[in-house]
Image: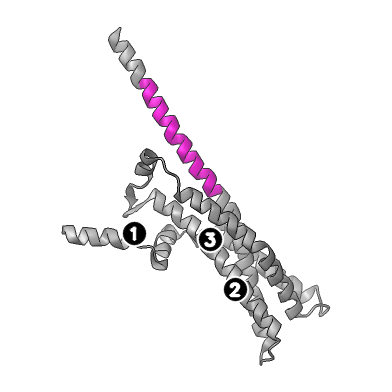
Amino acid sequence: MEVDEIIEDIKRKHKGGFNTLLMIYLKHKRLLKSLQLWLAVGFSIIFLLLSLFCLNGKVSIIELMAVVVNNVLSIMPTILGFSLTGYVLFIGFGNSNFMKNITEQNDEGYSFFQHFSSIFAWCVLVQSITLILSFVVSFFIGLNIQYENALIVNYAVLYIVLLSMFYSLFLIVRFVLNMFQFSQEVQFYYTENKLKKEIDASKREDHNT
């Protein structure tokens, strides 16, 4: 491979667009293997079935949807703020020696840092979409528009909002675990360096004696 081709490949893998995020995050089928996603799917289906059979017409689908989106709009900005703060702290970690180690490209051109960053970015992106989606749905609920097949459409929209909401909530756990794993990597790096220095010092002492 020519030098120009290598440079172009490196540039492609370091673009900041949505496609690059998906390319890194979806690597190794990360989304399909996500426990948080499948928990969100299950919880959404259970919630939808409960609304169909247990409420028994006491609460309309529009009223139920309004309750859901209002709760999302009330809690999601705080959750999103927490995620953004954690992401900024992760990106801003400034130890040059440690960063040098974790930015080495070792997984088909992607580094440990890029993989970790993609997970943080995905969490923030999903939570942002959930907030925007809830705002849009809340806006249309307020318009009280009448349309054909309203019941089917309303339940479909409710399921999408529920899925997005539960997925965003479960991603908080993933986010915290990622932060913990990153802190463990930092601790391991410093522990390893300290141990190497102690071994080197011990060898020098043995050599001098």
> Looking at the picture, which amino acid does disc 1 mark?
His
Query: Which is more toward the observer, 39 or 189?
Result: 189
Q: Does residue 83 appear left or right of residue 9 in this picture? A: right
In this rendering, is residue 152 above or below 36?
A: below
> What are the residue bounds of the magenta stretch?
177-199
Mark carried by residue 124: 3
Give the image location of residue 100, x and y in percent: 34, 43
Give the image location of residue 74, x and y in percent: 69, 65
Residue at the image point whose x is 50% and y is 48% from the top: 89
In this rendering, is residue 180 above or below 125?
A: above
Q: Marks 2 and 1, Cα distance to the nearest angstrom?
A: 29 Å
Q: Does residue 77 appear left or right of residue 54 in this picture? A: left
Residue at the image point whose x is 42% and y is 35% from the top: 189
> Looking at the picture, which amino acid does disc 3 mark?
Val
Mark carried by residue 78: none
Give the image location of residue 95, x and y in percent: 41, 40
Q: Secondary structure at mark 3?
A: helix
> Looking at the picture, which amino acid does disc 2 mark?
Leu
Residue at the image point whose x is 32% and y is 50% from the top: 105
Q: Does residue 25 appear left or right of residue 204 in this picture? A: right
Q: To which residue does mark 1 refer?
A: 14
In this rendering, is residue 69 above or below 77?
A: below
Q: Secondary structure at mark 2?
A: helix
Q: Secondary structure at mark 1?
A: loop
Query: Which is more toward the observer, 65 or 82?
Result: 82
Q: Marks 3 and 2, Cα distance to the nearest angstrom?
A: 14 Å
Q: To which residue does mark 2 refer?
A: 133
Split into 4 quadrants, where in the image is the C terminus?
A: top left
Q: Is residue 160 visible?
A: no
